Image: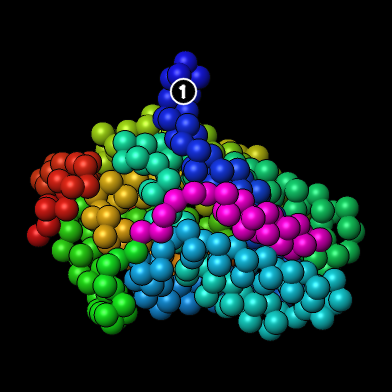
Amino acid sequence: MAGSQAFGGIGRALGNANYRIYWIGLCASMVGSWVFRTAVGWLTWELTKSPAWLGIIVAVEVIPSFFVAPPAGALVDRIGSLTTTKAVQLAWGIHVSVLSILTFSGLITIELLVGLAFLQGFINAFNNPGQLALVARLVPRSDISPAVALQSATVHGARFIGPPIAGGIIVLANESLAGPAWAFALNGVSFFMFFIMLFYVRIEEQRLPGSWRKGLFTDMVEGMRYVSGHFALRTILIFTVIMGLFLRSIVELFPGIVDNVFGRGAEGLALLLSAAGAGAFISAVWLARRGETRGLTQVFAWHFLIGGAATLAFALTTEFWLAAFFAMVFGFTTNTVSVAAQTLAQNSVDGRMRARVMSIVGLTFRPVPALGALLLGWLAEFLGFSWPIAVGAAVSLLAAIWLLLFMRRRDLATAAELAGDQSDTIQD
């Protein structure tokens, strides 16, 4: 008990055996995922030397999510979140193993990479609603806030650890293809490990009774109407989308920024990603220890504002170590906004709608930033990297100011921070 109190919400979340098992597997999977993402970005740059391709490869990966995620959320509500998460981890393990073999053999091309990125995006469309719905079922409602924040801390702790591992592998391999190939192989092992760990999670699947008698399209539309009619969910989603488009999207352009703006190689990319990851990790640990939803709407709004300012400063500097500092602030603030948004959504949603709502919220984690990266990457082809990022940061600053003023007129805190059984009734 003393240990749980010392670690605040973190101790409470890990005190749940099912969540603890899930978290151990997630740690391995997330480190492998960030090794993978770093290697894909570097491989894309090695094959093309084009900032536009950096945006394209990410955009292609997430295009399926925009179309598949809403019906995927409805399907997860039908078949269960644990079953879905197991299937996703197995599919991912097979996918990256194939990519590793193609890269080792020298057969990989930018066209093949685009095709595999599209397949990755299709799989990921099921991952977000599956995992997000599963986390809320592994802990009691009182522990949802620290459980969500600890999951984010794990993702971003891996973001701090994974890129240096990938950078080290690429440098040690001393070949343009061998390094990414080994990174992909490591990622495959991590996915298979998580898949095995999930069999030790002991919960009964929660499925919608009689849902197979209704059409999947009906379930999907029902979830969309629920979000659009829910004042808190709708407001949180709008501003999280803005952040994803104009702030979080710049991470996907880091390979080109490191090379073109700062004249550094894979080690520079690893350092910049790790700086942003360190900030995000500190943010997530802070939120996990905080362990409550009260006051999260203010946290959401103010960190949105600070994140816009940090991104603007990042765009205007030409000093690498100063850029790394601003990347750390950027990582802290944007992750705070993201975790706060997810926690408020989990807290507000009707449990019967959870996977469908979280499939929509999950689009703001990677698909929306990827769309922003496609736009900013295309503009960077003509204007360089600094101006598109600076303009996006300015748009975010204006949106954050408007949100802070908006919150004075509408009681967003009451609508978003009430317990789910109460906030389900707060709809327009």
Asked if residue 213 lies in the magenta stretch, the reply is: no
Residue 397 vs 11, above or below: the answer is below
Can residue 224 be seen in this snapshot? no
What sort of colour scheme is used for the picture? rainbow
Amino acid type, label 1: Ser
Q: Which quadrant holds the N terminus?
A: top left
Location of residue 271 by image quarter: top right
Asked if residue 204 lies in the magenta stretch, the reply is: yes
For the residue pair 270 and 126, the one nearer the viewer reads as: 126
Q: Seen in the image, is 330 located left or right of residue 102?
A: left
Q: Residue furthest top?
A: 2
The x and y percentages for residue 14 are 49, 34
Residue that carries the numbered disc 1 in the rendered image = 4
Can residue 208 be seen in this snapshot? yes
Residue appearing at x 47%, y 15% in the figure: 2
Q: Which quadrant holds the C terminus?
A: bottom left
The x and y percentages for residue 378 are 53, 74
Residue appearing at x 80%, y 65% in the figure: 181
Q: Seen in the image, is 231 located left or right of residue 3?
A: left
The x and y percentages for residue 377 are 55, 69
The x and y percentages for residue 212 are 31, 77
Q: Main secondary structure of the magenta part?
A: helix
Q: Secondary structure at mark 1?
A: helix
Residue 103 vs 297, above or below: the answer is below
Q: Residues within 10 Å of mark 1 (few under 14, many from 20)?
A: some
Residue appearing at x 57%, y 78% in the figure: 118
Query: In this picture, which residue range is highlighted in magenta?
Result: 182-206
Residue appearing at x 69%, y 50% in the figure: 163
